[in-house]
Image (spheres, grey):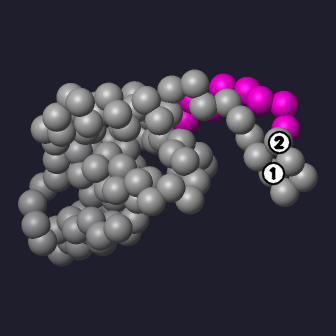
Amino acid sequence: MPRELISWAMHKLGVEEWLVSAVMSMYSGAKTVRTVYGNIKSFEVKVGMHQGSTLSPLLFMIVMEAISREFRVALPWELLYADDLAVTAETEEELIKRLNEWKDNVESKGMSQYE
């Protein structure tokens, strides 16, 4: 998940600027990589959320909610819960269409299933 997407989502959902700045400051300049063998040569990390952080699941939900507000059809056709998405439709063709729309819209924001 691109870091700019986290900031965009927080702004879109009306999070106050001081809090957006505080969250984003945690991600600026992140360079150290720790392994079981110790720290490895550092490099700048520009995508993703901190693994194991209690804030990461909330940030993920904020991003998914902000993205989905841009193209969501209506409840009960699409439901988000934690990191799951449930999409329903009356026909298989409509279901495939809705799933592809979700995939295309999420990818258009810079997210990938392989990150």
Residue located 71% across and 35% down the image? 32
Of residues 103 and 80, the one nearer the viewer is: 80
Residue located 55% across and 48% down the image? 50
Residue 39 circle label: 2
Instruction: Give the quadrant of residue 29.
Output: top right
Residue linked to disc 1: 35
Q: Is residue 43 magenta?
A: yes
Residue located 55% across and 35% down the image? 47
Q: Which portion, as a residue range, is magenta?
A: 40-47
Q: Amino acid at mark 1?
A: Thr
Whether residue 81 is visible, yes or no, is yes
Instruction: Give the quadrant of residue 6.
Output: top left
Q: Residue 11: x percent and y percent?
A: 21, 33
Q: Amino acid at mark 2?
A: Asn
Q: Under tag 2, what secondary structure?
A: strand
Residue 60 circle label: none
Residue located 24% across and 52% down the image? 65
Q: Is residue 44 left or right of residue 49?
A: right
Q: Residue 109: x percent and y percent?
A: 37, 35
